[in-house]
Image (cartoon, helix red, strand yellow):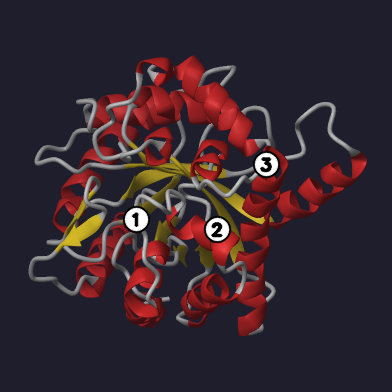
Amino acid sequence: MPTPILLLDGGLGTTLADQHGCVFSESTPLWSSHLLLSDPHSALLTTQTAFANAGADVLLSATYQASYEAFARTGKGVSEGEAGRLMRRSVKIARDSFKQKGSENGIVALSLGAYGAAMVPSQEYSGKYDASHLSAEALRAWHTRRLQAFAPVAAGTSDSLEEEKIGVWNDVGYVAFETVPVLEEIEAARAVMSEVGKEFWVSCVFPGEGNMLPDGSCIKDVVRAMLERHQSLAVPWGIGLNCTKVGKVEGLLLEFEKEVDILVGGGEAEWPALVIYPDGTDGETYDTVAKEWVKSPATAWDETIFGIVKRARDRGLWKSILVGGCCKTTPEDIGRLRRRIDQVA
Protein backbone atom coordinates (compact mmCIF):
# COMPACT_ATOMS: atom_id res chain seq x y z
CA MET A 1 0.00 0.00 0.00
CA PRO A 2 1.46 3.42 -0.97
CA THR A 3 2.62 5.69 1.83
CA PRO A 4 -0.21 8.15 2.65
CA ILE A 5 0.47 11.80 1.81
CA LEU A 6 -1.19 14.66 3.70
CA LEU A 7 -1.04 18.23 2.42
CA LEU A 8 -0.23 21.04 4.84
CA ASP A 9 -0.99 24.72 4.23
CA GLY A 10 1.58 27.39 3.36
CA GLY A 11 3.00 30.64 4.69
CA LEU A 12 0.23 32.30 6.66
CA GLY A 13 2.09 35.44 7.73
CA THR A 14 3.69 36.09 4.35
CA THR A 15 0.38 35.52 2.53
CA LEU A 16 -1.33 37.98 4.85
CA ALA A 17 1.39 40.51 4.06
CA ASP A 18 1.63 39.92 0.32
CA GLN A 19 -2.02 39.35 -0.58
CA HIS A 20 -3.96 41.19 2.13
CA GLY A 21 -1.81 44.23 2.84
CA CYS A 22 -1.01 43.32 6.43
CA VAL A 23 2.09 45.09 7.73
CA PHE A 24 4.23 43.40 10.37
CA SER A 25 6.97 45.28 12.23
CA GLU A 26 8.44 45.85 15.69
CA SER A 27 5.03 47.18 16.73
CA THR A 28 3.42 43.83 15.87
CA PRO A 29 5.62 41.30 17.73
CA LEU A 30 2.96 38.62 17.32
CA TRP A 31 3.32 38.57 13.51
CA SER A 32 0.17 36.86 12.10
CA SER A 33 -1.10 36.29 15.65
CA HIS A 34 -1.43 40.10 15.95
CA LEU A 35 -4.62 39.81 13.89
CA LEU A 36 -6.21 37.99 16.83
CA LEU A 37 -6.12 41.45 18.46
CA SER A 38 -6.64 43.86 15.58
CA ASP A 39 -8.77 41.86 13.14
CA PRO A 40 -10.03 38.80 14.98
CA HIS A 41 -11.93 37.15 12.16
CA SER A 42 -11.87 38.39 8.58
CA ALA A 43 -8.25 38.38 7.36
CA LEU A 44 -7.19 35.21 9.16
CA LEU A 45 -10.38 33.39 8.23
CA THR A 46 -10.16 34.50 4.60
CA THR A 47 -6.52 33.47 4.25
CA GLN A 48 -6.86 30.13 6.00
CA THR A 49 -10.02 29.37 4.03
CA ALA A 50 -8.03 30.02 0.85
CA PHE A 51 -5.52 27.37 1.92
CA ALA A 52 -8.36 24.97 2.74
CA ASN A 53 -9.97 25.63 -0.64
CA ALA A 54 -6.60 25.00 -2.29
CA GLY A 55 -6.75 21.46 -0.92
CA ALA A 56 -4.82 21.55 2.35
CA ASP A 57 -5.69 18.61 4.60
CA VAL A 58 -4.02 20.29 7.60
CA LEU A 59 -4.14 23.94 8.67
CA LEU A 60 -1.72 25.42 11.20
CA SER A 61 -3.22 27.76 13.79
CA ALA A 62 -2.11 31.41 13.80
CA THR A 63 -0.05 30.96 16.96
CA TYR A 64 3.53 30.50 15.73
CA GLN A 65 4.83 33.61 17.51
CA ALA A 66 2.07 33.80 20.11
CA SER A 67 3.20 33.76 23.72
CA TYR A 68 2.32 35.55 26.92
CA GLU A 69 5.48 37.63 26.59
CA ALA A 70 4.65 38.65 23.01
CA PHE A 71 1.12 39.73 23.94
CA ALA A 72 2.59 41.82 26.78
CA ARG A 73 4.94 43.55 24.31
CA THR A 74 2.04 44.79 22.17
CA GLY A 75 1.45 47.59 24.68
CA LYS A 76 -2.29 47.03 24.53
CA GLY A 77 -2.68 45.96 28.15
CA VAL A 78 -3.54 42.36 27.32
CA SER A 79 -3.88 40.34 30.52
CA GLU A 80 -2.57 36.80 30.77
CA GLY A 81 -6.11 35.45 30.80
CA GLU A 82 -7.05 37.45 27.70
CA ALA A 83 -3.85 36.33 25.94
CA GLY A 84 -4.79 32.71 26.58
CA ARG A 85 -8.30 33.30 25.25
CA LEU A 86 -6.94 34.94 22.09
CA MET A 87 -4.53 32.07 21.49
CA ARG A 88 -7.37 29.57 21.85
CA ARG A 89 -9.45 31.59 19.39
CA SER A 90 -6.88 30.85 16.68
CA VAL A 91 -7.79 27.16 16.80
CA LYS A 92 -11.46 27.99 16.25
CA ILE A 93 -10.60 30.22 13.29
CA ALA A 94 -8.65 27.38 11.66
CA ARG A 95 -11.54 25.00 12.30
CA ASP A 96 -14.01 27.55 10.90
CA SER A 97 -11.86 27.82 7.77
CA PHE A 98 -12.55 24.18 6.99
CA LYS A 99 -16.24 24.77 7.66
CA GLN A 100 -16.20 27.68 5.20
CA LYS A 101 -15.01 25.17 2.63
CA GLY A 102 -17.85 22.86 3.64
CA SER A 103 -15.55 20.26 5.18
CA GLU A 104 -15.72 18.71 8.64
CA ASN A 105 -12.74 16.43 8.01
CA GLY A 106 -9.88 18.91 8.00
CA ILE A 107 -7.16 18.65 10.63
CA VAL A 108 -6.04 21.61 12.75
CA ALA A 109 -2.42 21.60 13.90
CA LEU A 110 -1.54 23.80 16.86
CA SER A 111 1.45 25.85 15.74
CA LEU A 112 4.05 26.34 18.48
CA GLY A 113 7.12 28.18 17.30
CA ALA A 114 10.47 27.71 18.97
CA TYR A 115 11.37 29.90 21.94
CA GLY A 116 13.53 31.92 19.58
CA ALA A 117 10.42 33.00 17.66
CA ALA A 118 9.24 34.82 20.80
CA MET A 119 12.51 36.74 21.23
CA VAL A 120 13.12 40.28 19.92
CA PRO A 121 14.67 40.17 17.42
CA SER A 122 13.62 36.61 16.67
CA GLN A 123 16.35 34.00 17.06
CA GLU A 124 14.87 30.77 15.68
CA TYR A 125 17.27 30.96 12.71
CA SER A 126 20.33 31.54 14.89
CA GLY A 127 19.55 29.56 18.05
CA LYS A 128 21.20 32.32 20.09
CA TYR A 129 18.97 32.08 23.14
CA ASP A 130 19.27 34.20 26.26
CA ALA A 131 21.11 32.76 29.24
CA SER A 132 17.92 31.86 31.09
CA HIS A 133 16.67 29.60 28.27
CA LEU A 134 19.67 27.50 27.34
CA SER A 135 18.78 24.27 29.13
CA ALA A 136 16.18 21.67 28.19
CA GLU A 137 14.60 22.13 31.61
CA ALA A 138 14.15 25.90 31.17
CA LEU A 139 12.76 25.45 27.66
CA ARG A 140 10.39 22.77 28.91
CA ALA A 141 9.02 25.18 31.52
CA TRP A 142 8.50 27.89 28.90
CA HIS A 143 6.73 25.56 26.46
CA THR A 144 4.62 24.03 29.24
CA ARG A 145 3.29 27.43 30.28
CA ARG A 146 2.27 28.26 26.72
CA LEU A 147 0.74 24.84 26.06
CA GLN A 148 -1.39 25.24 29.18
CA ALA A 149 -3.28 27.98 27.33
CA PHE A 150 -4.72 25.21 25.14
CA ALA A 151 -4.53 21.91 26.99
CA PRO A 152 -6.72 21.16 30.03
CA VAL A 153 -3.75 20.31 32.25
CA ALA A 154 -3.40 23.29 34.61
CA ALA A 155 -4.45 22.83 38.22
CA GLY A 156 -6.60 25.42 39.95
CA THR A 157 -8.43 26.75 36.88
CA SER A 158 -12.17 27.34 36.81
CA ASP A 159 -14.59 24.75 35.49
CA SER A 160 -15.71 27.06 32.68
CA LEU A 161 -12.12 27.65 31.58
CA GLU A 162 -11.40 23.93 31.64
CA GLU A 163 -14.50 23.29 29.53
CA GLU A 164 -13.32 25.89 27.03
CA LYS A 165 -9.88 24.29 26.88
CA ILE A 166 -11.36 20.82 26.43
CA GLY A 167 -13.36 22.07 23.44
CA VAL A 168 -10.28 23.66 21.89
CA TRP A 169 -8.06 20.69 22.64
CA ASN A 170 -10.55 18.35 20.97
CA ASP A 171 -10.28 20.50 17.83
CA VAL A 172 -6.49 20.06 17.73
CA GLY A 173 -5.36 17.09 15.66
CA TYR A 174 -1.61 17.63 15.97
CA VAL A 175 0.72 19.83 17.99
CA ALA A 176 3.50 21.28 15.84
CA PHE A 177 6.81 22.34 17.38
CA GLU A 178 8.26 24.34 14.50
CA THR A 179 11.54 25.87 13.38
CA VAL A 180 13.46 24.34 16.28
CA PRO A 181 17.12 25.48 16.15
CA VAL A 182 18.70 23.84 19.21
CA LEU A 183 19.00 20.25 20.38
CA GLU A 184 17.83 21.00 23.92
CA GLU A 185 14.51 22.29 22.60
CA ILE A 186 13.76 18.96 20.90
CA GLU A 187 14.09 17.26 24.28
CA ALA A 188 11.96 19.99 25.87
CA ALA A 189 9.15 19.49 23.34
CA ARG A 190 9.13 15.74 23.92
CA ALA A 191 9.07 16.25 27.68
CA VAL A 192 6.13 18.65 27.47
CA MET A 193 4.15 16.27 25.27
CA SER A 194 4.69 13.41 27.70
CA GLU A 195 2.16 15.20 29.93
CA VAL A 196 -0.65 15.39 27.36
CA GLY A 197 -2.22 12.84 25.04
CA LYS A 198 -1.84 14.27 21.55
CA GLU A 199 0.13 13.37 18.44
CA PHE A 200 2.83 15.91 17.64
CA TRP A 201 5.67 16.65 15.30
CA VAL A 202 9.02 18.34 15.69
CA SER A 203 10.45 20.15 12.67
CA CYS A 204 13.85 21.80 12.68
CA VAL A 205 15.36 24.62 10.67
CA PHE A 206 18.57 24.38 8.65
CA PRO A 207 19.42 27.92 7.49
CA GLY A 208 23.17 27.65 6.95
CA GLU A 209 25.26 26.12 4.20
CA GLY A 210 25.84 22.81 5.97
CA ASN A 211 23.30 20.22 7.08
CA MET A 212 23.39 21.29 10.71
CA LEU A 213 21.13 23.02 13.18
CA PRO A 214 21.98 26.64 13.99
CA ASP A 215 23.55 25.34 17.23
CA GLY A 216 25.91 23.14 15.19
CA SER A 217 24.19 19.80 15.88
CA CYS A 218 24.55 17.20 13.13
CA ILE A 219 21.64 15.19 11.68
CA LYS A 220 22.66 12.09 13.64
CA ASP A 221 22.27 13.95 16.93
CA VAL A 222 19.06 15.62 15.76
CA VAL A 223 17.40 12.32 14.83
CA ARG A 224 18.49 10.67 18.06
CA ALA A 225 17.12 13.58 20.07
CA MET A 226 13.85 13.25 18.19
CA LEU A 227 13.34 9.48 18.34
CA GLU A 228 15.42 7.70 20.96
CA ARG A 229 13.16 6.05 23.50
CA HIS A 230 13.18 7.50 26.99
CA GLN A 231 10.74 6.84 29.80
CA SER A 232 10.03 10.54 30.41
CA LEU A 233 9.89 11.65 26.77
CA ALA A 234 7.00 11.23 24.33
CA VAL A 235 7.86 9.97 20.84
CA PRO A 236 6.82 12.31 18.01
CA TRP A 237 4.26 11.21 15.43
CA GLY A 238 6.38 12.99 12.84
CA ILE A 239 9.82 14.54 12.40
CA GLY A 240 11.39 16.70 9.75
CA LEU A 241 12.14 20.25 8.69
CA ASN A 242 10.52 23.56 7.89
CA CYS A 243 11.48 27.11 6.93
CA THR A 244 14.48 25.78 4.99
CA LYS A 245 15.52 26.51 1.41
CA VAL A 246 14.11 24.13 -1.17
CA GLY A 247 17.53 23.29 -2.56
CA LYS A 248 18.62 21.76 0.75
CA VAL A 249 15.61 19.53 1.34
CA GLU A 250 16.56 16.36 -0.55
CA GLY A 251 20.05 16.15 0.91
CA LEU A 252 18.71 16.69 4.41
CA LEU A 253 15.98 14.12 3.87
CA LEU A 254 18.45 11.45 2.77
CA GLU A 255 20.55 12.10 5.88
CA PHE A 256 17.43 11.87 8.04
CA GLU A 257 16.55 8.54 6.44
CA LYS A 258 20.04 7.16 6.99
CA GLU A 259 20.01 8.00 10.70
CA VAL A 260 16.43 6.83 11.32
CA ASP A 261 17.23 3.56 9.55
CA ILE A 262 20.17 2.99 11.91
CA LEU A 263 17.94 3.52 14.96
CA VAL A 264 15.19 1.30 13.57
CA GLY A 265 17.69 -1.41 12.65
CA GLY A 266 19.01 -1.37 16.20
CA GLY A 267 15.54 -1.64 17.69
CA GLU A 268 15.83 1.84 19.20
CA ALA A 269 12.99 3.46 17.23
CA GLU A 270 10.19 2.93 14.73
CA TRP A 271 9.69 4.82 11.49
CA PRO A 272 7.65 7.98 12.16
CA ALA A 273 5.87 10.22 9.67
CA LEU A 274 8.00 12.56 7.57
CA VAL A 275 7.17 16.27 7.87
CA ILE A 276 8.58 18.71 5.31
CA TYR A 277 7.45 22.24 4.58
CA PRO A 278 10.28 24.34 3.19
CA ASP A 279 10.15 27.99 2.18
CA GLY A 280 8.28 28.87 -0.98
CA THR A 281 11.35 30.39 -2.59
CA ASP A 282 14.92 29.23 -2.91
CA GLY A 283 16.22 32.76 -2.94
CA GLU A 284 14.46 35.28 -0.71
CA THR A 285 15.62 35.49 2.88
CA TYR A 286 14.06 37.19 5.88
CA ASP A 287 15.99 39.93 7.68
CA THR A 288 15.02 39.48 11.35
CA VAL A 289 16.33 42.92 12.31
CA ALA A 290 14.72 44.95 9.51
CA LYS A 291 11.70 42.60 9.54
CA GLU A 292 11.44 42.45 5.77
CA TRP A 293 12.12 40.02 2.95
CA VAL A 294 15.29 40.59 0.96
CA LYS A 295 14.34 39.82 -2.61
CA SER A 296 16.17 37.76 -5.18
CA PRO A 297 14.80 35.81 -8.15
CA ALA A 298 12.13 33.45 -6.90
CA THR A 299 11.76 29.92 -8.22
CA ALA A 300 8.58 27.88 -8.45
CA TRP A 301 8.86 24.96 -6.08
CA ASP A 302 5.79 22.69 -6.41
CA GLU A 303 7.42 20.44 -9.02
CA THR A 304 10.64 20.19 -7.00
CA ILE A 305 8.85 19.42 -3.75
CA PHE A 306 6.54 16.91 -5.40
CA GLY A 307 9.54 15.08 -6.88
CA ILE A 308 11.20 14.88 -3.46
CA VAL A 309 8.00 13.58 -1.86
CA LYS A 310 7.36 11.05 -4.61
CA ARG A 311 10.88 9.64 -4.34
CA ALA A 312 10.54 9.43 -0.56
CA ARG A 313 7.23 7.62 -0.93
CA ASP A 314 8.70 5.23 -3.49
CA ARG A 315 11.43 4.28 -1.01
CA GLY A 316 8.64 3.17 1.33
CA LEU A 317 10.33 3.96 4.64
CA TRP A 318 8.17 6.61 6.30
CA LYS A 319 4.88 5.78 8.01
CA SER A 320 3.25 8.71 6.20
CA ILE A 321 4.28 12.04 4.69
CA LEU A 322 3.04 15.52 5.58
CA VAL A 323 4.15 18.09 3.03
CA GLY A 324 3.41 21.77 2.57
CA GLY A 325 5.09 25.13 2.47
CA CYS A 326 6.48 27.70 4.86
CA CYS A 327 7.38 31.36 4.25
CA LYS A 328 6.30 32.83 0.89
CA THR A 329 4.18 29.80 0.00
CA THR A 330 0.77 30.91 -1.27
CA PRO A 331 -2.61 29.19 -1.58
CA GLU A 332 -1.90 29.01 -5.31
CA ASP A 333 1.33 27.09 -4.63
CA ILE A 334 -0.53 24.69 -2.36
CA GLY A 335 -3.23 24.23 -5.00
CA ARG A 336 -0.62 23.25 -7.60
CA LEU A 337 0.98 20.83 -5.17
CA ARG A 338 -2.48 19.36 -4.42
CA ARG A 339 -3.05 18.61 -8.10
CA ARG A 340 0.31 16.87 -8.41
CA ILE A 341 -0.35 14.73 -5.34
CA ASP A 342 -3.82 13.79 -6.59
CA GLN A 343 -2.34 12.52 -9.84
CA VAL A 344 -0.47 9.77 -8.00
CA ALA A 345 -2.95 9.09 -5.21
Residue at 56% from the left image edge and 55% from the top image edge: 109
For residue 308, above or below residue 121 = below
**Mark before the other along the chain sequence, 1 or 2:** 1
Q: Which residue is mark 2?
A: 61
Q: CA distance from mark 1 to mark 2?
A: 20 Å
Residue at 70% from the left image edge and 57% from the top image edge: 171
Q: How far across and down, in percent of the image, does residue 56 sit? A: 48, 72
- Residue 5 in which image quadrant: bottom left
As helix, strand or loop, the secondary structure at mark 1 comes to loop
Quadrant assignment for the C terminus: bottom left
Query: What amino acid type is highlighted by mark number 2?
Result: Ser
Q: Residue furthest right?
A: 159
**Mark before the other along the chain sequence, 2 or 3:** 2
Q: Which residue is mark 1?
A: 25
272 to the left or right of 211: right
Query: What amino acid type is highlighted by mark number 3?
Result: Ser
Q: Which mark is residue 208?
A: none
Answer yes or no: do the residues labelled 1 and 2 have beta carbons within 8 Å?
no
As helix, strand or loop, the secondary structure at mark 3 comes to loop
Number of labelled discs? 3
Q: CA distance from mark 3 to mark 1?
A: 22 Å
Q: How far across and down, in percent of the image, does residue 99 sit? A: 67, 78
Q: Which residue is mark 3?
A: 79
131 to the left or right of 306: right
Residue at 42% from the left image edge and 16% from the top image edge: 132
**Which of labels 2 and 3 is toward the front?**
3
